[in-house]
Image: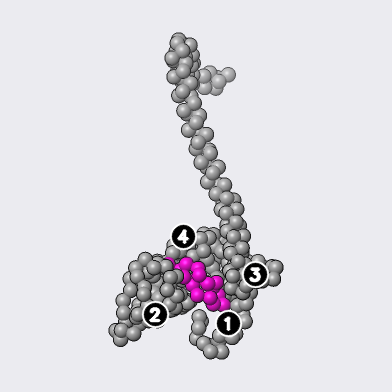
Amino acid sequence: MYRLTLILKRIAVPLLFIVVEILAISKYSSATSFTRARLLAISNGVTGAVNESFGSVGAYFSLRSENDVLTQRILELEAQLATRQEVAERGEVEAGNVPYLFSQARVIKNSVFAQYNYFTINKGRMDDVEPNMAVLTPDGFVAGYVLDCSERYSVCMSVANRDFTMGGKGKNNEFMGSIAWNGDNYRRVNLENIPHYAPFAKGDTIISTISYRFPPDRIIGIVEEFESSEDKMNSHLTVRLAADLSRLDRVLLVKFLGGEEFKELHSTYEPEEEK
């Protein structure tokens, strides 16, 4: 009983204050229609803010599922595009004979500031991932290719890697060269071995050439600078990558069904191509 008395003494003043406040607010709210409306507006404002906060939190946690849906839709569209390209190039194609297979993965580890940059994805051999599969962003921009796989994970070589090479060409003029990274800025690569007379200009789009890794006509980047070599025989182009490699999250994996045949044939004549 003594303890209860002590507790009541401690909370008596705050309790009395709360009771008085409730009575005051009740009296004020019933005074006029204006005061009732004002209190209701304040109450609704507070409630709305709380609901909006919870709604924002819910929307944030729903982003992953929405991204999955969007990425899956991109896969379907990519497959349809590959089929139409095959039809256009060959005139006709058997049902289901699609040259490229698309799947999706998430980047779980990434580097961009080293000289030899790699990123790891959450898919491996048990998901039918294989070395030399192209890796694109959901927008279809070149990001790298699969280098090695375990059962559940794969390590990919980034475009921003000194060992990375691929074929590139102008979207509008079809002059081909080799894409390589010089180890400087992860947002820029070089397009080499371009004839000096090739009509390139700043702002031109550079796309991929067909290889055993990459499908053709995928955007690599935009020409920022170009200059002639010392012997005036070739041009050196600086290309700003379309893919922001530092923000890789969802990616598309592309398997060229004729990749091994393509590689075997070309390795006879070009053994150094795309090591």
Amino acid type, callout 2: Ile
Q: Residues within 10 Å of mark 3 (few under 14, many from 20)?
A: some
Separation of marks 3 and 2 at Cα, in angstroms:
32 Å
Name the residue tied to disc 2: 194
Residue in the picture at 51% in, 41% down: 56
- The percent coordinates of residue 235 (x first, y second) are 35, 79
Q: Secondary structure at mark 2?
A: strand
Amino acid type, callout 1: Lys
Q: Secondary structure at mark 3?
A: loop
- The percent coordinates of residue 84 (x first, y second) are 60, 66
Name the residue tied to disc 3: 98
Q: Which residues are magenta?
A: 206-221
Q: Quadrant of residue 149?
A: bottom right
Compared to residue 106, the image places residue 20 above or below, namely: above
> Horizontal placement of 50 versus 259: left or right?
left
Q: Main secondary structure of the magenta part?
A: loop
Q: Quadrant of residue 75?
A: bottom right
> Horizontal placement of 104 versus 23: left or right?
right
Foreground mark, 3 or 1? 3
Which label number is shown at residue 263? 1
Whether the magenta-drawn stretch holds residue 216 is answered as: yes
N-term-proximal mark, 4 vs 3: 3
Compared to residue 96, the image places residue 65 above or below, namely: above
